[in-house]
């Protein structure tokens, strides 16, 4: 599936921690709120929000292939692709060096 995000959206493939026996270790959830940032790889980046005629807001040099930490609270799963999430640029907290 080819997904081109619009405006200030990103498509990210979430990296889930696994044990050596390949058992999934879920994120810690307390009172229904995730309190930790999630790590993922950027798959696609939108062009940025339009701020005036012909100009777009910066996407903070985010590009496919970067590993980022982001808040999963406002993420939406992409249909048909396990692990792919659609997030806003503002959900990104930082780039993993």
Image (spheres, rainbow, N blue to C red):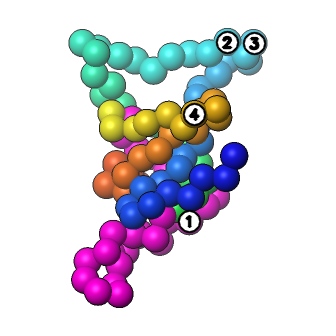
Q: Give the range drawn in magenta.
A: 46-72
Q: Earlier in the sequence, mark 2 or mark 1?
A: 2
Please give the label number shown on residue 23. 2
**Residue tagged 1:** 63
- In the rendered image, residue 18, in percent from the top left (x then y), is placed at 64, 22
Percent across and percent down for residue 85 are: 51, 40
Q: Label 3, secondary structure: give it.
A: loop
Tell me whether circle 2 and circle 1 mark residues in contact (CB < 8 Å). Answer: no
Which image quadrant for residue 63?
bottom right
Secondary element at image label 2: loop
- Give the CA distance from mark 4 to mark 2: 24 Å
| Residue 22 image-quadrant placement | top right
The residue located at (40%, 18%) in the rendering is 28
Q: Tell me which label, 4 or 3, sits earlier in the chain.
A: 3
Label drawn at residue 21: 3
Instruction: Give the mark nearest the N terminus, 3 or 1.
Output: 3
Residue 4 appearing in the image: yes
**Callout 1 touching callout 4 (CB < 8 Å):** no
Rendered view: 92 above or below 81: below
Between 80 and 97, the one nearer to me in the picture: 80
Q: Is residue 65 magenta?
A: yes
Report the residue at 37% width, 52% height from top: 88
């Amino acid at each position: 599936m080819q997904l081109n995000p619009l405006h200030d959206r990103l498509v990210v493939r979430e990296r889930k921690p696994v044990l050596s026996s390949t058992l999934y270790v879920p994120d810690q959830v307390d009172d229904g709120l995730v309190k930790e940032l999630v790590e993922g790889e950027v798959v696609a980046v939108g062009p940025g929000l339009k701020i005036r005629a012909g100009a777009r807001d910066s996407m903070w040099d985010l590009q496919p292939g970067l590993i980022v930490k982001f808040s999963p609270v406002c993420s939406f799963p992409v249909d048909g692709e396990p692990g792919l999430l659609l997030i806003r640029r503002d959900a990104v907290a930082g780039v993993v060096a």
